[in-house]
């Protein structure tokens, strides 16, 4: 969850590809008097291509962009509000009329942009709910910090709201999956996939980036391709590399090969004491271990810590009785490049022969997978 609020914080914008020619865009935006400035962005620019004041609830943008470029229109209330309504528009040279408010998006013009508007309307509703929850989390955390609450006290108090937030996050990812499945012959999935790919499983991303899809050559999906490449290092069906050696909390050296490929299912869990989402996920791993260890299931924790004391204290406080190893090198850990781990929590489930069964199983997904194995 390194990108906890990428989708609802201020401007992280997406791009797309130049394909044929440079048709003119002619976009008229209508909104409410709550918004005073509109910005237009193309191709993942760090800043807007153009900004204009909104007059009487209306603003128009005209210019040239590559055919198929995805234009993002972002509205501002002039008060630096973190939640800013926006809409994606695929540049196809068709004059566009877009109604964008804090609660709704509607796009008229070409058929593909009308369809995009429908999806944007659904997404905006989800993001607004996430933003409201985020504000509650932020307010409570700040108040508790001022009153001297401990990390665990704050984490426990925030858990119900974090779980509520994750429900809507999952709804957003489910929407993106539906968009991908419903649009195999056009470029509508591009901006949604570019935003949500880190929250998706390997199989979903792999299928979405199949060479037969018309959008896979978009430059804005380069990060998705790179991410998929890292997942290939722990691709289900392949054997997990075990030639990695680190120390346990007592300083004794261990190789992953000591536990992998010895006849039992093993979860290799990548985490760190400083990682809040990892700590939140750990009770699920503990439950899985306690339920299935007697049947042969085992866990190896590989930590991305850099502070030995914090690592050892976390193992104790989180009640992690399994094998724990680390080279205490933070993101410079040997595991980063070896297994393509660039965000945590993450994990790999391997069978008794050391073949990868699945990756990034969390919460109920982990329990369901083990239930199926040990039924």
Image (cartoon, grey):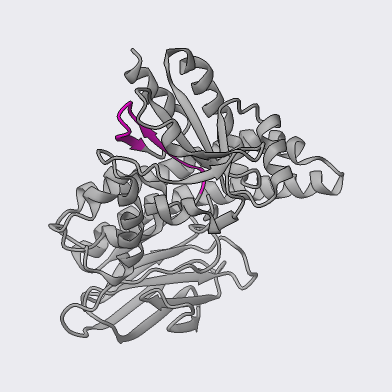
- Residue 202 position in % (x across, y down): 31, 45
Q: In this view, does 275 lie to the left or right of 151?
A: left
* Residue 365 seen in the figure: no
* 48 w.r.t. 180: above or below: below
* 147 w.r.t. 54: above or below: above
Residue at image x 28%, y 83%? Answer: 65
- Residue 258 position in % (x across, y down): 44, 32
Residue at image x 48%, y 83%? Answer: 52
Residues rendered magenta in the picture = 344-358
Residue at image x 74%, y 36%? Answer: 152
Q: In this view, does 88 lie to the left or right of 143?
A: left
* 112 w.r.t. 287: above or below: below
Q: Is residue 222 left or right of residue 323?
A: left
Q: Is residue 356 in the magenta section?
A: yes
* Residue 112 seen in the figure: yes
- Residue 49 position in % (x across, y down): 42, 83
The image quarter in which residue 224 lies: bottom left
Residue at image x 32%, y 53%? Answer: 119
Q: Quadrant of the C terminus?
A: top left
Q: Is residue 309 in the magenta section?
A: no
* 102 w.r.t. 360: above or below: below
- From the viewer's side, name the closer residue of 265 and 140: 265
Q: In the displayed orientation, state which residue is furthest to the front.
A: 252
Q: Is residue 26 left or right of residue 282?
A: left
- From the viewer's side, name the closer residue of 65 and 364: 364
The image quarter in which residue 151 lies: top right
- From the viewer's side, name the closer residue of 231 and 329: 329
- Residue 291 position in % (x across, y down): 49, 15
């Amino acid at each position: 969850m390194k990108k906890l609020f990428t989708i609802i914080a201020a401007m992280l914008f997406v791009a797309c590809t130049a394909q044929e020619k440079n048709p003119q865009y002619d976009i008229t935006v209508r909104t409410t008097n709550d918004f005073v400035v509109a910005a237009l962005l193309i191709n993942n620019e760090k800043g807007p291509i153009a900004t204009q004041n909104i007059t009487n609830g209306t603003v128009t943008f005209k210019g040239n962009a590559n055919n198929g470029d995805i234009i993002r229109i972002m509205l501002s209330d002039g008060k630096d509000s973190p939640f800013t309504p926006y809409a994606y528009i695929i540049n196809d040279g068709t004059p566009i009329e877009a109604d964008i408010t804090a609660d709704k998006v509607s796009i008229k013009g070409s058929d593909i942009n009308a369809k995009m508007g429908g999806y944007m309307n659904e997404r905006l509703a989800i993001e607004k709910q996430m933003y409201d929850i985020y504000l509650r989390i932020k307010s409570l955390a700040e108040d508790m910090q001022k009153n001297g609450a401990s990390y665990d006290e704050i984490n426990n108090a925030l858990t119900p709201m974090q779980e509520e937030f994750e429900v809507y996050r999952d709804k957003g990812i489910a929407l993106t999956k539906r968009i991908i499945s419903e649009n195999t012959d056009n470029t509508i999935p591009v901006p949604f996939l570019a935003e949500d790919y880190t929250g998706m499983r390997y199989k979903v991303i792999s299928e979405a980036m199949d060479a037969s899809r018309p959008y896979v050559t978009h430059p804005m999906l380069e990060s998705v391709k790179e991410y998929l490449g890292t997942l290939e290092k722990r691709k289900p069906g392949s054997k997990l590399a075990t030639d990695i050696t680190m120390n346990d909390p007592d300083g004794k050296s261990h190789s992953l090969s000591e536990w992998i490929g010895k006849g039992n299912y093993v979860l290799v869990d990548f985490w760190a004491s400083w990682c809040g989402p990892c700590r939140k996920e750990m009770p699920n791993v503990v439950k899985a271990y306690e339920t299935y260890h007697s049947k042969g299931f085992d866990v190896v924790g590989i930590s991305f810590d850099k502070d030995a004391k914090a690592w050892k204290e976390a193992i104790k406080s989180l009640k992690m009785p399994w094998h724990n190893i680390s080279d205490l090198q933070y993101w410079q850990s040997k595991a980063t490049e070896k297994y393509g781990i660039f965000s945590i929590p993450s994990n790999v489930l391997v069978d008794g022969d050391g073949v990868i069964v699945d990756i990034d199983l969390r919460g109920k997904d982990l329990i369901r997978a083990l239930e199926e194995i040990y039924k």
